[in-house]
């Protein structure tokens, strides 16, 4: 097999992994729609928190900047998925602000301004003071820190599942989409030889695997309890 053919296959496999990651991420972005339909229907944010969407927006913006050719050429699929993610988070935050009580509304608007100010500062520093290799390292480390913090958030849910021995608060579809997205971008990062992509997504893949394993274990346990209920004689 010629080197040209091998190179073509390599590119196709790399792009396929990146596109798959985009698709699975899109499923994740859609997962919050039921929550916001409820907020709109009830015209209230109730007890829901807007913080996860603020964190997600900042994460998407940092990773979007890392995927841009000015920072990291050749990984445009990282930029595309995070640009879509940023749009979704902005929509969610906008809806939240509209229906939140005034104190929360002001807090969310302040946090939103802080996110854009932080992102603008990162872009300014990386373009104004850093050469190309240093810029990639600077933004890359920031993206890794942001992604790992995002992937670590399910640890709270995992702890809750183990404590309650119930998968009620860990939807299977969400866990599966998280696992598949992380796996796809882990493979994409390996093809691109980019540690800033495959390391955090490798961690995400591991956490996703743990979630699926816990789901299988506790879901089976729940089914067994339903089959054999404890009845006092």
Image (spheres, grey):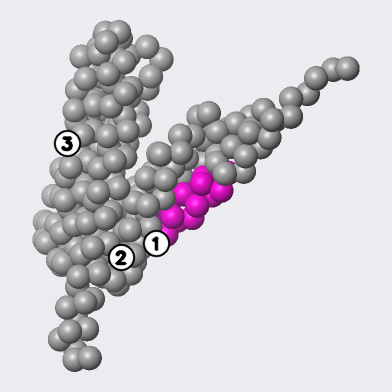
Q: Secondary structure at mark 2?
A: helix
- Residue extending furthest toward the bottom: 2
19 displayed left or right of 56: left
Q: Which residue appears at 23% of the width and 63% of the height?
A: 16
**Residue 90 in picture, x, y percent from top left:** 19, 31
- Residue 113 to residue 139: above or below: above
Residue 65 located left or right of residue 226? left
- Mark carried by residue 189: 2
Q: Nearer the viewer, residue 218 or 138?
A: 218
Q: Main secondary structure of the magenta part?
A: helix
Question: Which residue position holds label 3?
Answer: 87
Whichever of callouts 1 and 2 sits on the residue coming sooner in the sequence is: 2
- Residue placed under numbered mark 1 in the picture: 199
Quarter of the image with the C terminus is top right
User: Can you give x and y, in whole percent of width and height, for residue 143 in the image?
Assistant: 30, 53
Displayed quadrant of residue 101: top left
> 149 and 121: which one is in front?
149
Q: Nearer the viewer, residue 57 or 37?
A: 37
- State yes or no: discs 1 and 2 in contact (Cβ < 8 Å): yes
Residue at point 46%, 49% (across, down): 208
Q: What segment is highlighted magenta in the picture?
A: 201-214
Mark 3 crowd level (few <14, some 14–19, many ≥20, 10 Å Cα): some
Side of 45 relative to 71 (left or right): right
Q: Is residue 198 magenta?
A: no
User: Which residue is rendered at x = 57% and y = 44% of the image?
Assistant: 216
N-terminal of the pair, mark 1 or mark 3, is 3
Label 2 environment density (alpha carbons within 10 Å; few <14, some 14–19, many ≥20): many
């Amino acid at each position: 097999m010629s080197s040209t053919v091998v190179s073509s296959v390599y590119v196709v496999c790399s792009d396929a992994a990146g596109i798959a990651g985009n698709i699975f991420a899109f499923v994740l972005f859609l997962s919050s729609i039921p929550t916001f339909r409820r907020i709109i229907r009830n015209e209230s944010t109730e007890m829901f928190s807007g913080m996860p969407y603020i964190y997600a927006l900042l994460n998407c913006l940092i990773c979007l900047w890392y995927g841009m050719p000015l920072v990291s050429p050749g990984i445009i699929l990282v930029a595309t998925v995070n640009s879509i993610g940023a749009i979704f988070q902005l929509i969610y935050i906008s809806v939240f602000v509209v229906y939140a009580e005034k104190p929360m509304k002001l807090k969310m608007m302040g946090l939103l301004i802080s996110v854009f100010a932080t992102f603008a500062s990162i872009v300014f520093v990386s373009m104004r003071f850093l050469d190309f290799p240093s810029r990639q390292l600077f933004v890359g480390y920031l993206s890794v820190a942001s992604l790992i913090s995002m992937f670590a958030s399910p640890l709270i849910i995992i702890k809750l599942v183990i404590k309650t021995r119930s998968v009620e608060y860990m939807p299977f579809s969400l866990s599966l989409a998280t696992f598949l997205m992380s796996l796809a971008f882990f493979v994409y990062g390996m093809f691109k030889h980019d540690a800033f992509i495959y390391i955090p997504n490798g961690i995400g893949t591991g956490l996703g695997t743990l979630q699926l394993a816990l789901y299988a274990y506790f879901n089976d346990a729940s089914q067994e309890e339903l089959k054999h209920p404890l009845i006092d004689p």
